[in-house]
Amino acid sequence: MTGVSSQGADFNGKLVELAKAAVPRLTRISVISSATSPAHAPLVKELTTATSALGITPDSFPIREPTDVQASFTAMARKGVQAVIVLPEHVTWAHRARIVELVARGRLPTVCVYRVWADAGCLMGYGPSLDDMLYRAGVMAGKVLKGAKPADLPVEQPTKFELVINLKTAKALGLAIPQSLLARADEIIQ
């Protein structure tokens, strides 16, 4: 068995760093994750470690069904959350439109994994390039079709990451994104 992984070492801590760069006075952040994904528990733990290092209090909101999304945002408002990180998974993806609607309504800067979330209205999308991952999977499939044994091919980690910043969202939130952060962006949505 072989494949292409979307997880990279120390990747999730960068999500917290990006949120702090966009909201310098950030003291409380929420993490939206899947309640059913066993992979999310270690990711949330990694984010908790990263938030502690920056003096930020984290709250975790695992979702399973549509009612969990609304309940999470109601709880976030009560706790005074200043920003949100959304972890990728089929559950969060399935509720993407509702999540984006609620972060906009709550005026919460949101850092999401993958550019498609920034395209949908999140403040930032940061993560492995899906285009590059698909290309790498195609290269791997080509090797298998030419006779390579899948067990002999290593699982590849992402090597190309992209940062997309949505300035339309920043403007709607009244945020001035620092020039140093804009300079790091691979793409800026005007």
Image (spheres, rainbow, N blue to C red):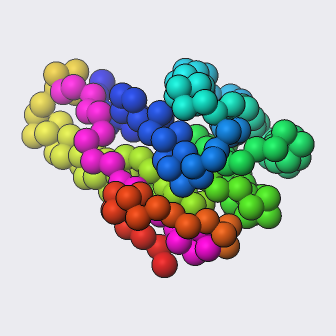
Residue 137, compared with residue 107, is above or below; it is above
Residue 127, compared with residue 122, is above or below; it is above
Residue extent of the magenta highlight: 153-171
Left or right: 102 as drawn, with respect to 56: right
Name the residue at 67% across, 48% down: 83
Task: Report the front residue among 50 and 44.
Answer: 50
- Is residue 87 visible in the rendered image? The answer is yes
Task: Report the front residue among 134 and 127.
Answer: 127
Task: Report the front residue among 70 and 3.
Answer: 70
Residue 128 image position (x, y, % from top left): 37, 46
Give the quadrant of the N terminus: top left
Task: Report the front residue among 36 and 87.
Answer: 87
Q: Looking at the image, which residue sits at the far bottom?
A: 190
Residue 8 image position (x, y, % from top left): 36, 33
Residue 178 image position (x, y, % from top left): 46, 61
- Is residue 169 visible in the rendered image? The answer is no
Residue 177, compared with residue 78, is above or below; it is below
Left or right: 117 as drawn, with respect to 84: left
Name the residue at 60% across, 60% down: 122
Name the residue at 58% across, 40% down: 87
Quick check: is 30 in the magenta stretch? no
Q: Looking at the image, which residue sits at the far front?
A: 25
Name the residue at 42% across, 70% down: 188
Residue 114 image position (x, y, % from top left): 47, 52
What is the count of numbered marks? 0
Question: Picture quarter containing residue 51?
Answer: top right
Question: Picture quarter containing residue 184?
Answer: bottom left
